[in-house]
Image (cartoon, rainbow, N blue to C red):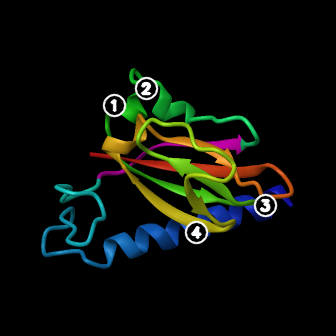
Amino acid sequence: MRTRSRLTVGLVLATALGLLLMGRAASPQVLTNLPCPGLQFVGAPNGFETRTVSTTVIRPTVAGSLASPSYATAALAVMVTETAAIRYRDDGTAPTATVGMFVASASVRVICAGSLERLRLIRDTGAGADATVSFQYYAR
């Protein structure tokens, strides 16, 4: 089951990145439809982590460390919820199980660099089990 889950995450990440790259302009690194204001290109993947999201507010480990090379050079992160619904806030305020941006299981969100440091996650009140959330970071 773990291999199947990692394969699913890989496919979802590949699909998300493919969607980001669909607006590719003439230059191989210039993108026209990125969701992050002012961002015109994305470099290579430069970090990955998987976190368990439960009833206590957490933040991404890599994003939580300003000294981390992945965070310091991240243009954005692709966040994939794998097993249960979560809620998040990217303004530095802790979400609750009922208040925050809802993300269903098997969903993909792009988190821009400016929001990574402030990102907080918690399991949604309707989720029957802990959520597994993966982050793929991309360099500037």
Distance from disc 2 to disc 3, alpha carbons, whole Å, reads 33 Å
Quick one: quadrant of the N terminus?
Answer: bottom right
Counting residues from the start of the chain, the first of labels 4 and 3 encountered is 4
Look at the numbered discs 4 and 3 and tell me whether their residues touch, using CB distance below 8 Å: no
- In the rendered structure, the answer to whether residue 20 lies left or right of residue 26 reads right
Counting residues from the start of the chain, the first of labels 4 and 1 encountered is 4
Farthest residue, direction top: 67
Residue denoted by label 1: 72
Question: For the residue labelled by badge 2, is the local secondary structure a helix, a strand or a loop?
Answer: loop
Residue denoted by label 3: 126
As drawn, the label of residue 25 is none
Counting residues from the start of the chain, the first of labels 2 and 3 encountered is 2
Residue 55, percent from left and from top: 76, 40
Question: For the residue labelled by badge 3, is the local secondary structure a helix, a strand or a loop?
Answer: loop
* Amino acid tagged 1: Ala
The residue nearer to you, when weighing 74 against 89, is: 89
Look at the numbered discs 4 and 1 and tell me whether their residues touch, using CB distance below 8 Å: no
Residue denoted by label 2: 68
Look at the numbered discs 2 and 3 and tell me whether their residues touch, using CB distance below 8 Å: no
- State the extent of the magenta-drawn residues as a range: 43-52
Look at the numbered discs 2 and 1 and tell me whether their residues touch, using CB distance below 8 Å: yes
* Amino acid tagged 2: Ser
Question: For the residue labelled by badge 1, is the local secondary structure a helix, a strand or a loop?
Answer: helix
Q: Is residue 65 above or below residue 118?
A: above
Residue denoted by label 4: 12
Estimate how packed mark 1 is, as few (under 14), some (14 to 19) or many (20 or more) residues with alpha carbons within 10 Å.
Answer: some
